[in-house]
Image (tube, rainbow, N blue to C red):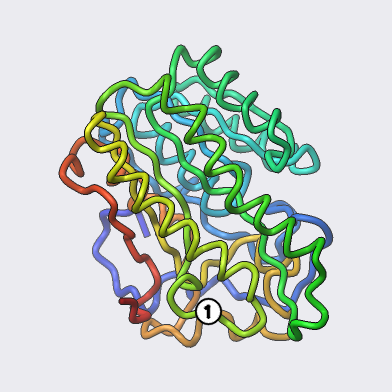
Amino acid sequence: MADQYTFADPTTLYADIDTKAISQDGSGLDSEMRDRADLGEQTYRGTGRLEGRKALVTGGDSGIGAATAIAFAREGADVAISYLPEEESDAQRIVALIEEAGRKAVALPGDITDRETSRTAIDETVAQLGGIDILVANAGRQQYVNEIADLTDESFDETFKTNVYPLFWMVKDAVPHMPPGSTIIATSSIQAYSPSSHLVDYASTKATQNAMCKALAQQLAPKGIRVNVVAPGPIWTPLQTAGGQPTDALPDFGEQTPLGRAGQPAELAPAYVFLASPESSYVVGETLNVNGGMPTP
């Protein structure tokens, strides 16, 4: 595919990327993927839709967050990315791509499940970019557990602390800095609507994000700040290989969609660009599903 505007059959896109049965420790690295996900490095073409904007993307080192950061930069935004310290190698690659696009990049390593680290991410973005008018709450934790008896209190708590608390904290800290016209976008999931039996805690957090953002959208719209959500389907990212799915299920990952394949992060980035840009000025409280055709309410 030459770029995201190239006419193509969506059922045969990315046929060269094979979702093999691989396993990674920790949060997973894009650089360790046997078949690397497409982040749009070679294909995303910007058209100036975010010129002069200032964005923070959490989980911006790999997967959907990285693809979004690359797209934002190529659309003209300066971009800060937050990520876990152990993901530094992936993060530096994205920083280089942001700078290659001629934009300022800010690297913010740290664990945003910590309240002060979350606050610092907003403060550093404002300080180093001169403000913030796009917040993408994308960082997430997904660990499959087949039986409820095996889902520990600690793991349940960590999933909520990763997926829900930073969304609340960062919106709370960012809003005082955000001028009218700013946008907030959260990454939910098809799991919010069609939860898998082995993702009880993850699916619960994704439904929570949806509800939180619909409430925030109503509260913040009068201030000129729009809040929306992107809900991906099965997307090929390190999250899946690092405990997000059973390893033996990965070869068939995404085949349940009407398109018959997993999506790629590069296919998500245009949704975030649309919701961040002024062209979506009347879109508020929306959950935009990018899931290969899986039915949602």
Residue drawn at the location 80% of the way across and 66% of the way down:
153
On screen, residue 223 above or below 145: above
Nearest the viewer among 191 and 276 is 191
Q: Is residue 162 left or right of residue 281?
A: right
On screen, residue 91 above or below 133: below
Quadrant in which residue 95 is drawn: top right
What residue does disc 1 label?
Answer: 195
Residue drawn at the location 47% of the way across and 87% of the way down:
256
Residue drawn at the location 52% of the way across and 53% of the way down:
64
Q: Is residue 199 left or right of residue 211?
A: right
Q: Quadrant of the C terminus?
A: bottom left
Nearest the viewer among 290 and 120 is 120
Residue 26: image location, x then y, percent: 81, 56
On screen, residue 287 above or below 79: below
**Which amino acid does the dot numbered 1 rest on?**
Pro
Q: Is residue 148 visible?
A: yes
Nearest the viewer among 192 and 223 is 223
Q: Is residue 3 visible?
A: no
Q: Is residue 201 left or right of residue 87?
A: left
Quadrant in which residue 177 is drawn: top left
Q: Quadrant of the N terminus?
A: bottom left
Tag 1 secondary structure: loop
Residue 74: image location, x then y, percent: 39, 34
Q: Residues within 10 Å of mark 1 (few under 14, many from 20)?
A: some
Residue 46: image location, x then y, percent: 32, 38
- Image label count: 1
Residue 83: image location, x then y, percent: 67, 39
Q: Is residue 204 left or right of residue 143?
A: left
